Image (tube, rainbow, N blue to C red):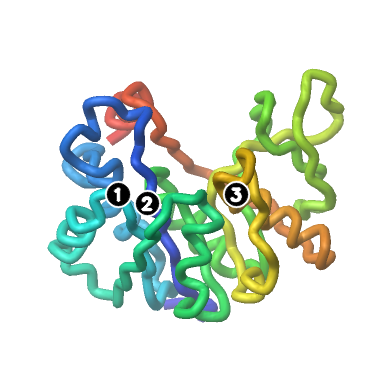
Protein backbone atom coordinates (compact mmCIF):
# COMPACT_ATOMS: atom_id res chain seq x y z
CA UNK A 1 0.00 0.00 0.00
CA UNK A 2 1.19 3.51 -0.77
CA UNK A 3 2.02 5.78 2.13
CA UNK A 4 -1.47 7.17 2.67
CA UNK A 5 -2.75 8.80 5.84
CA UNK A 6 -5.00 6.46 7.77
CA UNK A 7 -8.59 7.51 8.40
CA UNK A 8 -11.96 6.37 9.70
CA UNK A 9 -15.13 6.34 7.62
CA UNK A 10 -18.65 7.16 8.78
CA UNK A 11 -21.61 5.90 6.73
CA UNK A 12 -24.98 7.48 7.53
CA UNK A 13 -27.66 4.79 7.18
CA UNK A 14 -30.45 6.15 9.38
CA UNK A 15 -32.97 7.44 6.86
CA UNK A 16 -36.34 5.83 6.19
CA UNK A 17 -36.26 6.26 2.41
CA UNK A 18 -39.93 7.26 2.24
CA UNK A 19 -39.60 8.28 -1.43
CA UNK A 20 -38.71 4.70 -2.37
CA UNK A 21 -42.30 3.49 -2.05
CA UNK A 22 -42.80 -0.28 -2.12
CA UNK A 23 -39.06 -0.89 -2.46
CA UNK A 24 -38.75 -0.26 1.28
CA UNK A 25 -42.00 -1.86 2.38
CA UNK A 26 -40.22 -4.69 4.21
CA UNK A 27 -36.58 -3.62 4.24
CA UNK A 28 -34.64 -0.47 5.16
CA UNK A 29 -33.41 1.63 2.26
CA UNK A 30 -29.74 0.55 2.60
CA UNK A 31 -30.72 -3.05 1.84
CA UNK A 32 -31.96 -2.21 -1.65
CA UNK A 33 -29.90 -4.20 -4.13
CA UNK A 34 -28.04 -2.81 -7.09
CA UNK A 35 -27.11 -5.81 -9.16
CA UNK A 36 -26.35 -8.64 -6.76
CA UNK A 37 -25.15 -6.41 -3.93
CA UNK A 38 -26.79 -4.15 -1.38
CA UNK A 39 -25.81 -0.50 -1.05
CA UNK A 40 -23.63 -1.12 2.07
CA UNK A 41 -21.88 -3.97 0.26
CA UNK A 42 -21.04 -1.75 -2.70
CA UNK A 43 -19.83 0.95 -0.32
CA UNK A 44 -17.67 -1.27 1.87
CA UNK A 45 -16.04 -2.88 -1.16
CA UNK A 46 -15.22 0.58 -2.54
CA UNK A 47 -13.29 1.68 0.56
CA UNK A 48 -9.54 2.12 -0.02
CA UNK A 49 -6.94 0.26 2.00
CA UNK A 50 -6.05 3.23 4.20
CA UNK A 51 -9.46 3.12 5.92
CA UNK A 52 -8.85 1.71 9.39
CA UNK A 53 -12.32 1.62 10.94
CA UNK A 54 -15.90 1.99 9.73
CA UNK A 55 -18.69 3.57 11.77
CA UNK A 56 -22.24 3.01 10.56
CA UNK A 57 -25.02 5.17 11.95
CA UNK A 58 -28.32 3.26 11.99
CA UNK A 59 -31.88 4.01 13.03
CA UNK A 60 -34.88 2.73 11.01
CA UNK A 61 -34.95 -1.12 10.96
CA UNK A 62 -31.47 -1.03 12.44
CA UNK A 63 -31.41 -4.74 13.31
CA UNK A 64 -31.81 -5.76 9.67
CA UNK A 65 -28.96 -3.46 8.61
CA UNK A 66 -26.66 -4.70 11.37
CA UNK A 67 -27.41 -8.37 10.67
CA UNK A 68 -26.81 -7.95 6.94
CA UNK A 69 -23.54 -6.05 7.29
CA UNK A 70 -22.18 -8.47 9.88
CA UNK A 71 -22.95 -11.34 7.49
CA UNK A 72 -20.59 -9.80 4.93
CA UNK A 73 -17.55 -10.59 7.10
CA UNK A 74 -15.85 -7.33 6.17
CA UNK A 75 -12.18 -7.62 7.23
CA UNK A 76 -11.92 -4.28 9.05
CA UNK A 77 -13.55 -3.23 12.32
CA UNK A 78 -17.14 -2.02 11.97
CA UNK A 79 -18.93 -0.16 14.75
CA UNK A 80 -22.68 0.47 14.74
CA UNK A 81 -24.00 3.63 16.39
CA UNK A 82 -27.72 4.24 16.87
CA UNK A 83 -29.37 7.53 16.03
CA UNK A 84 -32.39 7.30 18.32
CA UNK A 85 -34.13 10.29 16.76
CA UNK A 86 -33.93 10.97 13.02
CA UNK A 87 -33.03 14.64 13.27
CA UNK A 88 -31.00 15.10 10.11
CA UNK A 89 -27.57 14.32 8.76
CA UNK A 90 -25.57 16.51 11.14
CA UNK A 91 -27.34 14.94 14.10
CA UNK A 92 -26.54 11.49 12.67
CA UNK A 93 -22.85 12.31 12.34
CA UNK A 94 -22.72 13.79 15.84
CA UNK A 95 -23.59 10.36 17.26
CA UNK A 96 -20.01 9.18 16.59
CA UNK A 97 -18.20 12.23 17.96
CA UNK A 98 -16.91 10.44 21.07
CA UNK A 99 -15.62 7.40 19.18
CA UNK A 100 -14.30 8.65 15.85
CA UNK A 101 -10.62 9.24 15.13
CA UNK A 102 -9.00 12.62 14.45
CA UNK A 103 -9.58 12.43 10.68
CA UNK A 104 -12.48 10.82 8.86
CA UNK A 105 -14.68 10.73 5.80
CA UNK A 106 -18.44 11.01 6.17
CA UNK A 107 -20.64 9.69 3.39
CA UNK A 108 -24.30 9.01 2.71
CA UNK A 109 -25.49 5.44 3.01
CA UNK A 110 -27.72 5.63 -0.07
CA UNK A 111 -25.17 7.04 -2.54
CA UNK A 112 -22.49 5.20 -4.48
CA UNK A 113 -18.92 6.51 -4.71
CA UNK A 114 -15.72 5.26 -6.32
CA UNK A 115 -12.60 3.98 -4.57
CA UNK A 116 -10.46 6.55 -6.37
CA UNK A 117 -12.59 9.46 -5.16
CA UNK A 118 -12.69 8.19 -1.58
CA UNK A 119 -8.93 7.69 -1.54
CA UNK A 120 -8.28 11.13 -3.00
CA UNK A 121 -10.51 12.82 -0.45
CA UNK A 122 -8.93 10.87 2.39
CA UNK A 123 -5.68 12.73 1.77
CA UNK A 124 -7.21 16.19 2.02
CA UNK A 125 -7.19 18.33 5.14
CA UNK A 126 -10.83 19.37 4.70
CA UNK A 127 -12.94 18.76 1.63
CA UNK A 128 -16.30 18.15 0.06
CA UNK A 129 -17.16 16.05 -2.96
CA UNK A 130 -19.14 17.89 -5.59
CA UNK A 131 -20.62 17.28 -9.01
CA UNK A 132 -20.05 20.38 -11.15
CA UNK A 133 -22.63 22.52 -12.89
CA UNK A 134 -25.93 21.37 -11.46
CA UNK A 135 -27.87 24.65 -11.33
CA UNK A 136 -30.96 23.66 -9.41
CA UNK A 137 -32.94 25.92 -7.12
CA UNK A 138 -32.22 25.31 -3.45
CA UNK A 139 -28.87 23.58 -3.81
CA UNK A 140 -25.53 25.04 -2.80
CA UNK A 141 -23.72 27.47 -5.04
CA UNK A 142 -20.03 27.39 -4.26
CA UNK A 143 -17.70 30.19 -5.23
CA UNK A 144 -14.45 28.52 -6.17
CA UNK A 145 -10.88 29.79 -6.14
CA UNK A 146 -8.09 27.33 -6.96
CA UNK A 147 -10.44 24.46 -6.07
CA UNK A 148 -11.10 25.80 -2.57
CA UNK A 149 -14.40 27.00 -1.19
CA UNK A 150 -14.36 30.70 -0.38
CA UNK A 151 -18.06 31.42 0.03
CA UNK A 152 -21.36 29.53 0.04
CA UNK A 153 -24.69 31.06 -0.96
CA UNK A 154 -28.15 29.73 -1.73
CA UNK A 155 -29.14 29.56 -5.35
CA UNK A 156 -32.17 31.54 -6.48
CA UNK A 157 -33.62 32.47 -9.84
CA UNK A 158 -31.20 35.38 -10.14
CA UNK A 159 -28.02 33.59 -9.11
CA UNK A 160 -24.76 34.83 -10.54
CA UNK A 161 -23.87 32.69 -13.57
CA UNK A 162 -20.18 33.40 -12.99
CA UNK A 163 -20.27 31.37 -9.80
CA UNK A 164 -19.46 27.70 -10.33
CA UNK A 165 -22.59 25.81 -9.36
CA UNK A 166 -22.13 22.40 -7.77
CA UNK A 167 -24.32 19.72 -6.36
CA UNK A 168 -23.19 18.55 -2.93
CA UNK A 169 -22.52 14.81 -3.04
CA UNK A 170 -22.83 14.17 0.69
CA UNK A 171 -19.21 12.99 1.02
CA UNK A 172 -16.86 15.06 3.18
CA UNK A 173 -13.31 14.87 4.52
CA UNK A 174 -13.47 16.25 8.04
CA UNK A 175 -11.57 16.43 11.30
CA UNK A 176 -12.81 15.87 14.81
CA UNK A 177 -12.74 19.58 15.59
CA UNK A 178 -15.94 19.95 13.56
CA UNK A 179 -17.70 18.69 16.69
CA UNK A 180 -16.55 21.75 18.64
CA UNK A 181 -19.18 23.77 16.79
CA UNK A 182 -22.96 23.82 17.03
CA UNK A 183 -25.02 21.93 14.49
CA UNK A 184 -27.01 24.16 12.14
CA UNK A 185 -30.77 23.83 12.53
CA UNK A 186 -32.91 23.60 9.38
CA UNK A 187 -36.57 22.92 8.55
CA UNK A 188 -37.90 25.01 11.44
CA UNK A 189 -35.60 23.32 13.90
CA UNK A 190 -36.77 19.79 13.08
CA UNK A 191 -33.47 18.75 11.51
CA UNK A 192 -29.78 19.58 11.70
CA UNK A 193 -28.12 19.83 8.29
CA UNK A 194 -24.60 18.51 7.78
CA UNK A 195 -23.66 20.56 4.67
CA UNK A 196 -25.03 23.67 6.35
CA UNK A 197 -22.98 22.93 9.49
CA UNK A 198 -19.80 22.32 7.50
CA UNK A 199 -20.21 25.52 5.47
CA UNK A 200 -20.80 27.57 8.61
CA UNK A 201 -17.78 25.98 10.28
CA UNK A 202 -15.62 26.78 7.24
CA UNK A 203 -16.71 30.41 7.21
CA UNK A 204 -16.47 31.07 10.95
CA UNK A 205 -13.10 29.38 11.40
CA UNK A 206 -11.60 30.48 8.04
CA UNK A 207 -11.03 26.81 7.22
CA UNK A 208 -10.70 26.26 3.45
CA UNK A 209 -12.66 23.36 2.00
CA UNK A 210 -11.19 21.66 -1.03
CA UNK A 211 -13.77 21.03 -3.73
CA UNK A 212 -13.18 17.63 -5.28
CA UNK A 213 -15.19 17.06 -8.44
CA UNK A 214 -16.16 13.42 -8.20
CA UNK A 215 -15.44 11.07 -11.07
CA UNK A 216 -18.35 8.85 -10.06
CA UNK A 217 -21.39 9.55 -7.91
CA UNK A 218 -24.78 7.90 -8.05
CA UNK A 219 -27.58 9.18 -5.83
CA UNK A 220 -30.53 6.91 -5.08
CA UNK A 221 -33.57 8.86 -3.91
CA UNK A 222 -36.38 7.24 -5.88
CA UNK A 223 -37.36 4.01 -7.67
CA UNK A 224 -36.38 5.68 -10.95
CA UNK A 225 -32.88 6.27 -9.56
CA UNK A 226 -32.64 2.61 -8.58
CA UNK A 227 -33.66 1.42 -12.04
CA UNK A 228 -31.23 3.82 -13.69
CA UNK A 229 -28.29 2.76 -11.53
CA UNK A 230 -29.11 -0.94 -11.90
CA UNK A 231 -28.53 -0.55 -15.62
CA UNK A 232 -24.95 0.53 -14.86
CA UNK A 233 -24.09 -2.66 -12.96
* Rendered view: 46 above or below 215: below
* Rendered view: 204 above or below 23: below
**Quadrant where the N terminus is found in the figure:** bottom left
> Image point 55% across, 61% down: which residue?
120
**Quadrant where the C terminus is found in the figure:** top left
Asked if disc 2 and disc 1 are in contact, CB closer than 8 Å, the reply is yes
Disc 3: which residue: 193
Tag 2 secondary structure: loop
Measured in 3D between alpha carbons, the distance from the residue under mark 1 to the one under mark 3, in whole angstroms, is: 19 Å
Measuring from the top left, give residue 43's x and y in whole percent: 34, 54
Side of 67 where 48 appears, left or right:
right
Side of 199 where 76 appears, left or right:
left
Measuring from the top left, give residue 201's x and y in whole percent: 74, 61
Measured in 3D between alpha carbons, the distance from the residue under mark 2 to the one under mark 1, in whole angstroms, is: 6 Å
Res. 60 mark? 1
Q: Name the one closer to the observer, 69 or 58.
A: 58
Disc 2: which residue: 14
Which sits earlier in the primary sequence, circle 1 or circle 3? Answer: 1
Q: Name the one closer to the observer, 138 or 54.
A: 138
Amino acid sequence: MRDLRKIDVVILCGGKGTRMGDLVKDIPKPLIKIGEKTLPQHKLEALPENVERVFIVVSHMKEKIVDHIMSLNFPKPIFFVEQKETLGTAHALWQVKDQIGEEFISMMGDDLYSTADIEFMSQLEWGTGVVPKAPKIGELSLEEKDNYLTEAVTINENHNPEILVNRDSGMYKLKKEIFNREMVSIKDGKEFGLPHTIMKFSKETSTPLYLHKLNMWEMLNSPDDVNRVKSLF
